[in-house]
Image (spheres, rainbow, N blue to C red):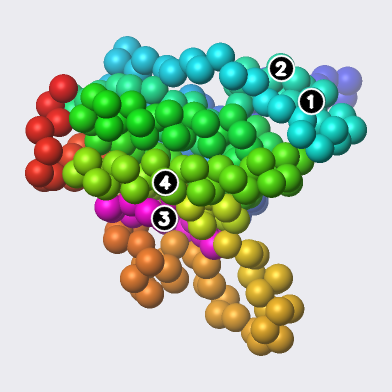
Amino acid sequence: MIEGKKADIPIGKWIKCPKCKEILYKDDVKANYSICPKCSHYFRLSSRRRIEQVVDKDTFEEFDLEIDTKDPLNMPEYINKIEGLRQKTGLKEAVKCGIGDINGKKAVVCAMDSNFFMGSMGYVVGEYITYSIERAIEEKLPIVIFSVSGGARMQEGIISLMQMAKTSAAVSKLHDAGLLYISILTDPTYGGVTASFATLADVILSEPGAMIGFAGKRVIEQTINEKLPEDFQSSEFLFKHGFIDKIVERKALKDTIAKIISMSKGDYNG
């Protein structure tokens, strides 16, 4: 390097893989479905990118319920943090929901976003998931939900826990209507989301290497005073024990979802 000269590296164009530690060009990773080209590590996707990868271009119509996050416990800085996340991410809350086509098959699609409070479920997320399920029933459409979450949002106390019962009741109505529900568990899916709508689907899929559970591995080990398997709570471990129907690579998710919709008994051609 010539003395006095700085390396011409564009800021924000490179990322480090947390698994293999390689420095990667962002555009190359994005072109590879946000999968590390060196070690196949799955980077977490924003809800916007998830929808771009799965829903046909220019077909997604997002729901806007015009509801806002509440602060039932009057916790210091909670609403300020929400506003800060909105400015940083461009999201209103931790889930994006709407109707779009998947290889020409119309469906209700929800995608949670780990960039917003780790995808935690509070009042607004619960309301959007419930509304999306009700729209699927109303329009006789299948519903696809991508879950990524740290669980129920503690800043909303019992209000967030109530969303577990509310979303589960909505799923029950969906099943009664004979409509298809596909759940895709991504890294990580934990807590009240796992214990409610995320695991009540007709078909449960997962991405490779996703961590899925209720309580974390360390908490369970401390509770039962036993050492758990190294791959405990990974999608591969859960598939082996019958909790997941299929592990699907990200590149194949769109075609797999469309195929499941085509094979189901409903007429979902939109």
Q: Is residue 265 visible?
A: yes
- Classify 10 Å Cα crowding around label 2: few (below 14), some (14-19), many (20 and above): few
- Look at the numbered disc 3 and give the secondary structure of its residue: helix
Residue 13: mark in rendering: none
- Residue highlighted by disc 1: 79
Mark 2 element type? helix
Distance from Cα at disc 2 to Cα at disc 3: 32 Å
Q: Measure the alpha-carbon separation of dots 4 and 1.
A: 29 Å
Which segment did they paint magenta?
A: 198-213
What residue lies at 64% left-to-right and 20% top-to-bottom?
68
Q: The residue tagged with tag 4: helix, strand or loop? A: helix
Amino acid type shown at disc 4: Ala
| Residue drawn 22% across the image and 41% down it | 177
Q: Is residue 204 magenta?
A: yes
> Residues at badges 4 and 1 in contact (C-beta under 8 Å)?
no
Answer with mark 2 or mark 3, whichever residue precedes in sequence: 2
